[in-house]
Image (cartoon, rainbow, N blue to C red):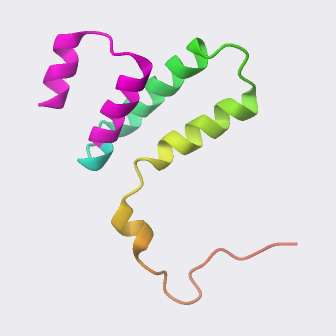
């Protein structure tokens, strides 16, 4: 339903496009990755003076929106955490 509405509207504003990505993430849609990549590309083009680090941070943060909240809350088995390297 949201996809149909977005198509009818045409090009969404950047905040609306991010909200649409949130809808896809909440629905566990396989389209989320492509949508968030498209949103990020628009963000970089529309944000003036953004650095590469800021761009990368925005992508990681936006991509994190698609992480299953349930998976984030489930504890890892002992010994399954990342190991520190020196």
Pick the residue in front: 56 or 80. Answer: 56
Q: Residue furthest right?
A: 86
Q: Measured along the vertical axis of the image, is residue 61 above or below residue 16?
A: below
* Identity of the residue drawn at 47% across and 30% down: 37
Dividing the picture into quadrants, the one containing residue 60 is top right
Q: What range is drawn magenta here?
A: 1-24
> Does the segment drawn in magenta span residue 20?
yes
Q: Measured along the vertical axis of the image, is residue 73 above or below residue 15?
A: below
* Identity of the residue drawn at 43% across and 20% down: 14
Dividing the picture into quadrants, the one containing residue 67 is bottom left
Q: Residue furthest top?
A: 10
The prevailing secondary structure element of the residues shown in magenta is helix
Residue 69 x %, y %? 37, 62
Pick the residue in front: 7 or 83. Answer: 7
Location of the N terminus (image quadrant): top left
* Identity of the residue drawn at 20% across and 16% down: 7
Query: In the rendered view, does 39 fall on the left or right side of 2?
Result: right
Residue 40 x %, y %? 52, 27
């Amino acid at each position: 339903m949201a996809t149909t509405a977005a198509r009818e509207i045409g090009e969404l504003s950047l905040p609306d496009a991010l909200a649409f990505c949130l809808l896809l993430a909440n629905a566990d849609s396989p389209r989320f990755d492509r949508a968030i990549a498209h949103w990020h590309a628009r963000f970089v083009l529309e944000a003036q003076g953004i650095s590469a680090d800021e761009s990368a941070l925005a992508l990681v943060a936006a991509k994190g929106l698609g992480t299953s909240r349930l998976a984030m809350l489930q504890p890892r088995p002992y010994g399954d955490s990342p190991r520190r390297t020196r």
